[in-house]
Structures are given as C-alpha cells and as structure tokens.
Amino acid sequence: MDPVVIVGGGTAGCIVARTLADLTGVPLVLVEPGPRTDDDAPRFMDGLSDAVMWPGLDYPQARALGGGSAVNGMILSGEEPGWLKGLTRQARPEEAGPLGTALLRSGGRLSRLWWNNGRWNPARAVLHLEEEGRMEIVRGTVGELVVDGARVPEVVVDGRAVRCSHVVLCCGAVLTPLLLRASGVRGSTGEGLQNHPTVTFTVDRPEGVAGRFDATTVLDIDSDGAVGLAVGFERAHAGDSGHGLVTVSLMNPRSRGAVADRVEFALLDDPWDAAAMERLTGTAEKVLARAGLTVREVSDPHPVSHPTSSCASVVDGRGMLHSLTNVTVADASVLPGVPPETPAASVTISALRIARLLGEELA
C-alpha cells in the first residue's frame, strides 16, 4: 500500500502523524525540510535564534520539526483546553524578569506556559514513531503535488517522485495555498487570509535579574470592542539584554488578505481595524509610561506568525479539498478566522479533529 504523505512537520503535521499512527496501520511518510531544534531552552530568544526561519516571508515562520511549537514564546494566552491539561502550567511571579514584573504592576497577568519548563514540541512524538519504524521522516521540500484527474498519486520531494495513497497538507496558511497553486489547484485557494496585526515597542529594559523565561506576562487591552493583547519579552533578541520588547496585537481583526502570486495580508485594510489598532497602541503607550518603561522605538503594524484561514473556503468539514478526492488540509489555513488568542491551541484542536476523522476512514 502506498503511504499517507504528510507535508509539513510543524504543530499540525506532527499531531496528524501521531494520531494516524495510533488509529491506523497505514504506512506514513512525514516530509519536513527543517531540523529539530533545542526545545529544552527555557528562554524564547535562545530557542528562536537556533531556529531556521523560512526565507522570503515578511514575518517569522519556523522551518523546523515541531514548527512554531518548537520555537515559540511558550505562552498560551487563552484558556487551557481540557485535553491539554498537564501540558501547561501557570507562570510564577518569581520567574518573571523586570520587564514582566513592571507589566504585572500595571495590570498585567501571568500567562500559562507550555510543557512545564520548556516548549510543548509535538516533534518529540514523531521522533518516537521514526525510532519505532512506524513512520518515515523525509528531510526535504515538496515542490508540487502531481494531479491526475481528481487524485494525487504522488508528490515531488526535491525533484523525486514519492507515491502516496493520501496527502495531508500541514504547511501553514501561507505555504499550503502556495503549494496548491504551484500544483495547479486554484479557484478560491488562498482567499480569506487573516493575521493579528501587531505593533512592537522597543523599550529600555529595567535593571534586575533576567528571569527564568523571556515571556511570562501578558496584558489584556480592550477599547470599544477591540480586543488587544500585549506580551512582554525580556530581551529584544538573544544578543541584546539591554532592551526588551512589548508587542501589542489586535486579536479580533476584520481585515482579510490573500495568498496568490504574492502574499497580501491586507493588515488594517478594514477602517475598523485601523481605528482599533490606533486606540490599542495609544492605550499601550500609557500603560508603558505608567510602568516606568522608556520607549525607544515603535514599529509600524506588521504581521506575526499567526496566519490562518487561507483554505477555509476550499475544504469541507473534514478538511478534504473539494476538488481532489485524496487531499486533506489540517493546518491553520482551515480555521474560519484567526482566533482571539495565540493560535497554537486552536491549531492543535483542529488538527487532532481532522486527523481522527481521517483515521477512522483509513482504519
């Protein structure tokens, strides 16, 4: 039997692989170009500096086994899903650095952290599958899906054809529609792209012990229906401990872009979004001043690594592409909209649901 080929070993891809291995006996191939990163590093900037980011994108996107979960800031801004209990815990005040402590004094709250003292990296599970001989991990990049009528009988990995019985696309909300377009699948593919527009404040970092984690504290900002989230980072990057970052994101945007010949996030195209982002930025400036943080630089609104929804209109409720009978999409691109919190939990839940449905069909 030809294998099920899972394209992309990020958060969604690893969850799909693990679930299909548990539910079925079909051969599995996971294609991922990135390496495994040091997900035990408790500080976000250290883990991020080790990650290989996708070239040519105007926002940070992990290119590593485990994806964003392997290199992210470890915070979960929303509520912990019931089935993830034990994989997160509440940060403690003594683990915050001086920037996080300043935000706590100004109305911030401690976030939940993934995987106790590190990241929740689903790559750990698929590496076990590889070691046990239950799945093959191919280090490479899928250039196209070979379409024959309404099916995909093979995918092309670095110029080499790999036979498949089914394909599960888990490349993310930008790379999945780009791959589909490169394979001749167009229609509404790529439409509906969303992200959290974000403004970054670079601040002088207060004196004090660095803290165990780079990010422990978030601040909820609401303004006339706009839902904002501020996240404090103790360092501007791995080599800069003199400055910190505070990102302010609009969590309920209305604007939508598209992935076509180029990626257009269309951030703040909706006038409501533009006005909301201006209000949130103004509120954040007042909070930072109240916290005693000196702002050195304020960025223009920019996209972050939270893109979603670019394939929601071309799949059914099981994640199956309308136009092909053996292609499923299970990543952030199938979410109906960008969630009002950091999207790791939403992506995880959606990928698990789609993988279970597919597993029942293949079993």
Image: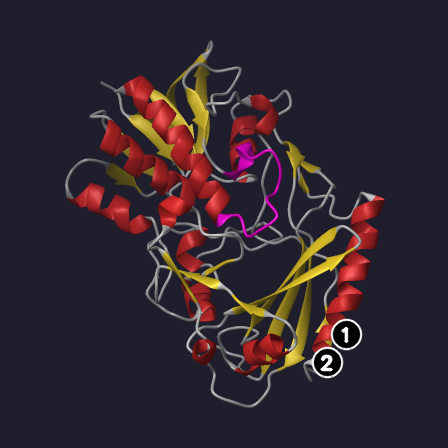
The residue wearing badge 1 is: 286
Residue 340 belongs to magenta span: yes
Q: Residue 306: image x %, image y %?
A: 57, 49
**Residue at mark 1 to residue at mark 2: CA–CA distance:** 6 Å
Q: Residue at x 52, y 52 (%)?
A: 61
Q: Name the secondary structure under disc 1.
A: helix
Q: Residue at x 74, y 41 (%)?
A: 255
Residue numbers of the magenta segment: 332-344
The residue wearing badge 2 is: 290
Number of callouts: 2
Mark 1 residue type: Lys
Tell me the chief SS of the magenta region.
loop
Q: Residues within 10 Å of mark 2 (few under 14, many from 20)?
A: few
Q: Residue at x 60, y 83 (%)?
A: 205
Q: Residue at x 65, y 76 (%)?
A: 106
Residue 62 belongs to magenta span: no
Q: Quadrant of residue 265?
A: top right
